[in-house]
Image (tube, rainbow, N blue to C red):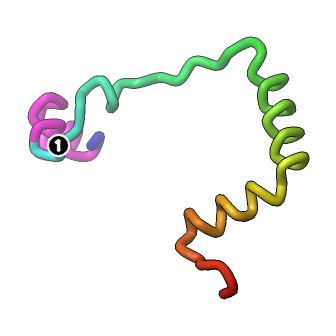
Amino acid sequence: MKYLVKQKGSSQRRVCIVMGLSRSLVSYIAKRRRDEAELIKKIHKLAIRNSGMATVGLRYCSGERAGE
């Protein structure tokens, strides 16, 4: 994206249209929450506590089937 805008002289708007991207997606800047570190700790604790279910979910998402 940046290459096309900078090197080829195309506008960001034009490049986004050609690539099928939203301009807001390209310019998005994530904002960190003050309590993000605490939320991550809680998520990890829940994942460990429910690790059996997490493993099943991960296997399902990766395309593995039961017994393989």
* Residue 9 image position (x, y, % from top left): 12, 37
Residue kind at label 1, given as amino acid type: Gly
* Residue 35 image position (x, y, % from top left): 77, 15
In the picture provided, is 61 more to the left or to the right than 20? Answer: right
Residue at the spot of label 1: 20
Bounds of the magenta segment: 3-17
Q: Residue furthest front?
A: 66
* Residue 51 image position (x, y, % from top left): 83, 55
Q: How many marks?
A: 1
Q: Nearer the viewer, residue 1 or 22?
A: 22
* Residue 7 falls inside the magenta stretch: yes
Residue found at x 56% / y 63%: 61
* Up-down relation of residue 32 to residue 52 (above or below): above
Helix, strand or loop status at disc 1: loop
In the picture provided, is 13 more to the left or to the right than 46? Answer: left
Q: Quadrant of the C terminus?
A: bottom right
Residue found at x 17% / y 43%: 20
Q: Quadrant of the N terminus?
A: top left
Q: Nearer the viewer, residue 16 or 49?
A: 49
Residue found at x 15% / y 39%: 15
Mark 1: few, some, or many residues within 10 Å (few <14, many ≥20)? few
Residue found at x 53% / y 73%: 63
Q: Main secondary structure of the magenta part?
A: helix
